[in-house]
């Protein structure tokens, strides 16, 4: 498509287009040709709400913590009960968004975050560059409720902008927010 730039950067495949409608059209025209290798765990169905507590308990990093008051309970009459509250997605008021622009070897990203210095560090690591060449601008954004402290969207926007050699605005849909955003039990860093 004449006005669309297709970007493939390692495992990221995306498009840069003049507007969202054209980007959706271009994405629909892309067909995946790579053979994806998955593990049994990653290819299995995600746990249902009914099974989520057992799944998280079984897969907790480092196992379940020991009761720090176990010694005080020795010989005491105790009553044990477990209560479960359904999982609720930890989602900010609005989905993640970022605008990224490269100027030579310098990167500027505008994104909503509660941790601008952490996002700057994440961008610097992603592009193997010193932090003093990365600028993160935090415009006013809606309530994030503790959910906007990582920079996945900022990194994606910067990768697309670098490959397209143009500024890129990236907005996750609510579906993408629920699928790819921060999930505490599966966070690796």
Image (cartoon, grey):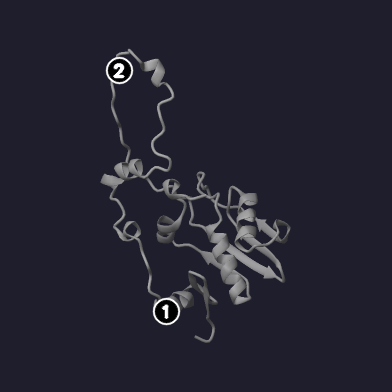
Q: Judge whether residue 64 can be spotted in this image.
A: yes
Taking the image as shown, residue 37 lies to the left or right of residue 132, namely left
The answer to which of 144 and 40 lies nearer the viewer is 40
Residue located 38% across and 70% down the image: 36
Rendered location of residue 184, percent (x, y) = 45, 46
Binning the other alpha carbons within 10 Å of mark 2 as few (below 14), some (14 to 19) or many (20 upward) gives few
The answer to which of 29 and 189 lies nearer the viewer is 189
Q: Quadrant of residue 109?
A: bottom right
Query: In the current view of this chain or complex, which residue is farthest to the bottom?
Result: 2
Disc 1 is placed on an element classified as loop
Query: In the current view of this chain or complex, which residue is farthest to the left?
Result: 50
Taking the image as shown, residue 139 lies to the left or right of residue 75, namely right
Rendered location of residue 60, percent (x, y) = 39, 42
Q: Which mark is residue 98?
A: none
Q: Judge whether residue 138 can be spotted in this image.
A: no
Residue located 54% across and 83% down the image: 3
Disc 2 is placed on an element classified as loop
Q: Quadrant of residue 75?
A: top left
> Marks 1 and 2, how far apart in space?
61 Å
Q: Are marks 1 and 2 in contact (CB under 8 Å)?
A: no
The earlier-in-sequence mark between 1 and 2 is 1
Q: Which mark is residue 78?
A: 2
Residue located 41% across and 33% down the image: 65
Rendered location of residue 116, percent (x, y) = 63, 51
Residue 1 position (above or below residue 95) = below
Binning the other alpha carbons within 10 Å of mark 1 as few (below 14), some (14 to 19) or many (20 upward) gives few
Q: Quadrant of residue 18?
A: bottom right
Camera-near label (1 vs 2) is 2
Per the image, the residue denoted by label 1 is 30
Taking the image as shown, residue 49 lies to the left or right of residue 162, namely left
Rendered location of residue 121, percent (x, y) = 64, 54
């Amino acid at each position: 498509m004449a006005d669309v730039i297709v970007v493939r950067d390692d495992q990221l495949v995306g498009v840069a287009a003049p507007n969202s409608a054209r980007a959706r059209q271009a994405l629909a025209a892309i067909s995946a040709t790579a053979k994806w290798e998955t593990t049994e765990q990653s290819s299995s169905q995600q746990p249902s709400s009914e099974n989520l507590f057992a799944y998280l308990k079984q897969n907790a990093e480092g196992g379940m913590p020991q009761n720090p008051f176990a010694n005080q309970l020795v010989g005491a009459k105790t009553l044990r009960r477990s209560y479960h509250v359904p999982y609720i997605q930890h989602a900010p008021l609005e989905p993640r968004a970022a605008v990224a622009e490269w100027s030579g070897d310098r990167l500027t990203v505008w994104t909503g975050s509660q941790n601008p210095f952490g996002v700057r560090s994440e961008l610097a690591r992603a592009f193997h560059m010193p932090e003093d060449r990365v600028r993160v601008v935090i415009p006013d954004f809606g309530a994030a409720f503790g959910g906007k402290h990582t920079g996945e969207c900022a990194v994606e926007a910067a990768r697309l902008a670098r490959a397209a050699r143009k500024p890129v605005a990236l907005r996750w849909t609510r579906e993408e927010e629920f699928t790819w955003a921060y999930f505490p039990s599966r966070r690796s860093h």
